[in-house]
Image (tube, rainbow, N blue to C red):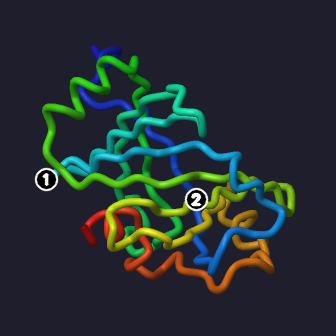
């Protein structure tokens, strides 16, 4: 009777690199973004994210869990990610009842080298406001490593915990 196991793999492996920027690249339209309101739930690996358009229209609410990959716990490029999509009202109920670190950022998307770079401009907490971090994902580590650092990036910060989302959220 193994047709109903207690544990199933619903997670996907996220392969990601991060870069810090001084400012948005000149090709980015500052009015074309999505706003991400995050709640990092205390005592867990859970993040509740509400995504809205630049005009404030609700786009998605996601409850996610991001944990280290068991086979590579020290590799900052790899995380195991699970996501549940929620209706806006259910996300709002969770957000009002859970305690944690809150953060807000604007996300811009830039196509380059055949990949989409997501550029986050932090708005809150106040101590992280103005920090600009770009991230890019790939289907394999080989493809990820083949991506050149963009000319508009100051430096790569994939291994620098100071630029992880949870660390930036904790600045407040």
Q: Is residue 148 left or right of residue 38?
A: right
The kind of secondary structure element at disc 1 is loop
Q: Classify mark 2: helix, strand or loop.
A: strand
> Mark 1 touching mark 2, by CB under 8 A?
no
Q: Residue at x 37, y 60 (%)?
A: 124
Residue in front for this viewpoint, 7 or 123: 123
* Cα–Cα gap, marks 1 and 2: 24 Å
Residue 34 in the figure: left or right of residue 42: right
Instruction: Judge left or right: residue 102 versus residue 49.
Output: left
The spot of residue 87 in percent (x, y) is 40, 17
The disc at residue 43 is 1
Q: Position of residue 105 (x, y in %)?
A: 48, 55
Viewport quadrant of the N terminus: top left
Mark 2 lies on residue: 15
Numbered label attached to residue 130: none
Residue shown at 33%/73% (left/top)? 127
Q: Position of residue 137 (x, y in %)?
A: 65, 57
Residue 54 in which image quadrant: top right
Depth check: 158 or 144 in front? 158
- From the top left corner, tell me how far across and down residue 138 is, in percent: 69, 56
Specify the quadrant of the image occupied by residue 169: bottom left
Q: 126 or 9: which is nearer to us? A: 126
Q: Quadrant of residue 86?
A: top left
Mark toward the viewer: 1 or 2: 1
């Amino acid at each position: 009777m193994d047709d109903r196991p207690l544990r199933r793999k619903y997670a996907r492996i996220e392969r990601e690199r991060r870069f810090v920027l001084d400012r948005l690249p000149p090709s980015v339209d500052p009015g074309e973004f999505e706003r991400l309101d995050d709640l990092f739930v205390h005592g867990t690996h859970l993040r509740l994210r509400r995504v809205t358009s630049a005009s404030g229209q609700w786009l998605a609410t996601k409850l996610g869990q991001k944990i280290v990959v068991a086979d590579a716990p020290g590799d900052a490029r790899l995380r195991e990610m699970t996501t549940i999509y929620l209706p806006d009202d259910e996300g709002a109920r969770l957000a009002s009842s859970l305690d944690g670190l809150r953060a807000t950022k604007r996300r811009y998307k830039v196509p380059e080298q055949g990949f989409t770079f997501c550029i986050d401009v932090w708005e809150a907490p106040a101590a992280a406001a103005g920090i600009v971090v770009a991230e890019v994902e790939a289907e394999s580590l080989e493809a990820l490593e083949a991506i050149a650092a963009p000319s508009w990036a100051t430096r790569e910060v994939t291994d620098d915990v100071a630029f992880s989302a949870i660390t930036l959220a904790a600045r407040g």
